[in-house]
Image (spheres, rainbow, N blue to C red):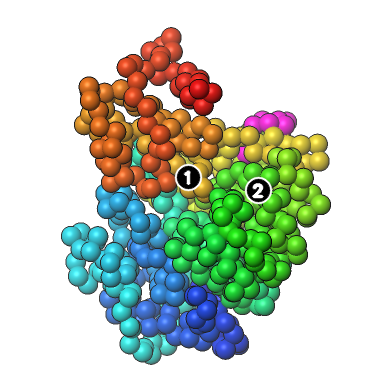
Amino acid sequence: MINPLLLDHAVRHHARHTPDAPGLSVLGTVTTYETLNSEIDRIAACLLDRGVQIGDRIVLCTAKGLKAIAALHAILRVGGVYVPLDPTAPAKRIAEQVSVVSPKYVLADTPRLALFAGVFAAPQLIDISQDFPEANMNDEMADRQARRSEYDAAYILMTSGTTGTPKGIVHTHKSGLAITQMAAARCRLTSSDRISHHTPLHFDMSIFDIFCTFLSGACCVVIPEAYTKLPASLSQLTEQERISVWYSVPHAIIQLVERGALADRNLLALRIVMFAGEVMPPSSLRSFSKHAPKATFLNAYGPTETNHCTTAEFTHADLDGTTPLPIGFPEQGVIARIGTEADEASTGELLIASDQVMSGYLNAPDLNRAAFCTLPDASGQPRQFYRTGDIVRRAQDGQLFLVGRKDRQIKLRGYRIELDEVELALVNCAQITEAAVIFFEDKIQAFATGQTGVDLNEIRSNLETVLPHYAVPSRIDLLSSMPRTSTGKIDRQKLIGIANAQRAA
């Protein structure tokens, strides 16, 4: 495995040393490292021609594929900061995220470019669906490279605060490389691996899919969005592409078990199956393991602010189908502690110190002060720790188990969702007076009060215009009044009781 100075250096290295090696595969169409590097250079030349400077934030809004991966590398290559946005998000949500990031430029495919046309001038909008001309920019690029640093921002991933206001999580080349080098070593990646690219670019798990793959000189196997929704086609693609390392949210694996026609597939090429983002049902993992006889299974844990920082590893013999899965031990270079007291508790908030941790939230000093604390490490030296907000307990063997969230942020199918943001969207509907949202049996359920004759279909349609699809409640119940605590607040525990009663009915 190479040791690059910056995240984008790996592709150029392999283009020089193994130019004909497969770097990317999309439905069987292979792109070599040399061809990928040339495409990156062409897009980078366009960015330089448009006046992109080191440190400029550049939105990337497109589906997975060759152009997307080349574009984000081109942004990095000229010293920019790529900001991937969900290409399926409602226009209002995209506009809110853009207002927080204040990007200088937008790279998008033709269908999505129109979303930004009213905000940006034409020179700031770049259609990556086009064919870019050949470019020779050796002198200018050499000057750029000399002025770049590992402490430069590399990418910003968007999430939402408790108020529903988007916030940007800033990672530098240093933190991104720390993540990729750790994970590549953890999975023992080699140039012969074929690694799935299942998650979208705006999801932090894509950092592994792309940068760990190229760090190792392996082949990134892009899984088109349509295939992620068709389990039988997905399992067929996994077999055809001979994927050796799989990484996804547990939901994808559950769908493969339930509807993936696994009995008809040969998945002998799988040697690593890694999952993250939510709790994996032990029974589903055991069922899947029967179809991947040569695989080792990894439960990866880590919020976007730290990325993957603890891991639990399982062999087939470890999977009994009933025992809850731990999130394991801290990875190399990661210090994990429970709570802020001198004597560590066995249960409490998980704190993380590592080079992998974000540099901070974009333009949010108050959030940063709340997110970090300084504590002594094992040698007594002061270290900055990130407060994950996750409550964990340490078992007798030292492994960590996830207990739950400290706040009201949840993870569903790997997506981070603020329940308060969903409530706010409901309350903003004209017919709704009050709203409360709970997370019950792995589903978002909403309760609301409002006008007589509330049209729930209209309410749901309204929500779909302001919330991403995964944040829209699976069920909305109308109540005559909200249950209250003694202080007059909505009693969410009583709402959970209502949900339990509904299930039992």
Q: Residue at x 81, y 41 (%)?
A: 397
Examine the structure image and report whether residue 1 is included in the region drawn in magenta: no
Which label's residue is closer to the chain start, 2 or 1?
2
Examine the structure image and report whether residue 347 is included in the region drawn in magenta: yes
Task: Name the amino acid type tagged 1.
Answer: Arg
Q: Which range of residues does the magenta coloring cover?
A: 341-350
Q: Report x, y in % for residue 391.
A: 61, 34
- Whether residue 447 sits left or right of residue 453 in the image: it is right
- The residue where tag 1 is placed is 416
- The residue where tag 2 is placed is 284
Reply above or below: 21 against 460.
Answer: below
Q: Secondary structure at mark 1?
A: strand
Q: Look at the image and tell me whether residue 316 can be seen.
A: yes
- Whether residue 478 sits left or right of residue 237 in the image: it is left
> Is label 2 or label 1 in front?
2
Give the crowd class for mark 2: few <14, some 14-19, many >=20 residues within 10 Å. Answer: some
Of 72 and 66, the residue lying toward us: 66
Q: Which mark is residue 245?
A: none
